[in-house]
Amino acid sequence: MSDAKWFKVRAPISESTRSQLVRVYALLTMGVVVAAIGCFADINYFHSGGLFTGLAGALMFAGARSVHASKGDNTATLLFLGAAGFEGMSLSPLVHTALRYYPQALISAALVSLAVFGSFSAAAVYAKRREFLYMTGIVGSMSSFLLIMYIANIFLRLRVIIDLQIYMGLGVMLLYLLIDTQIMIDRFETNQYYAGNYVRPACDLFIDLVGVFVRILIILMRKAEPERRQRRSTGASSQKSSRD
């Protein structure tokens, strides 16, 4: 049985494209597992996650995306998995905070992210070819607007801008997910990717997934913060009453 038959999609795409999609999503799954391992290892052993590991991951993603297929898939795959590990390490401070103070939010964020990712990916696969590609200019403009707001808020420090950045940023990442999925399918259908080059789209989708997860986790943590403060206040009052 061909691998493509495991990818049971009735969308108007060719058999070869289905086979490539299986490989892309299999590699993406491996990347998520490696990122989780990297995050766990950094929280418990290395404690080095942050800007440096984020930059290292970005450089390795760029390398994985640019490797020519003639040089072999192994090099690009190893770069992708290494980048995923560094990306997981860069997320460790945020995940550690969630584990310590908002464990339920972390679990919910992971489940919601996977559900949303799957739903939007399916929507892009089932949609007509290039249906969402017209939004590329809109998403680019939204990204530029977010960057301007980020720079402005360095000086303004307004909470409303932070909220807008988080929610609008989530919307941008979801749109990028739709666009990147359709770009991947279109390039597979028109043979614009080199034969066997499934690492590059996996890099794009991994970045989209991480962006969605981070923003959903931050939203859930912010929603859970008043409840956590109330519990702390109640606990402090109880301890004071018992001492009295």
Image (cartoon, rainbow, N blue to C red):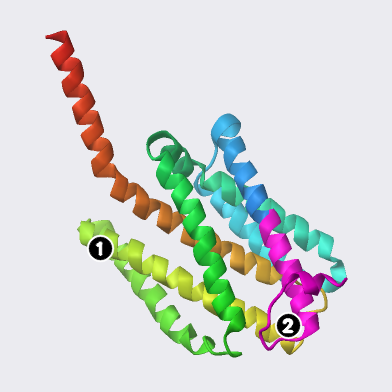
Secondary structure type for disc 2: helix
Residue 68 can be seen, yes or no: no
Q: Look at the image and give the residue range highlighted in magenta.
A: 1-30
Q: Quadrant of the N terminus?
A: bottom right
Q: Position of residue 11 (x, y in %)?
A: 66, 84
Q: Position of residue 65 (x, y in %)?
A: 69, 68
Q: Which mark is residue 161?
A: 1
Query: Splitting the image into 4 quarters, where does residue 147 fall?
Result: bottom left
Q: Position of residue 150 (x, y in %)?
A: 33, 63
Q: Residue furthest toward the top?
A: 244
Q: Residue at x 18, y 20 (%)?
A: 238
Vertical order, 37 against 138 (above or below): above
Disc 1 residue type?
Ile
Left or right, residue 131 beside residue 13: left
Query: Splitting the image into 4 quarters, where does residue 103 fall?
Result: top left
Give the residue number, with chain letter if any, for mark 2: 188
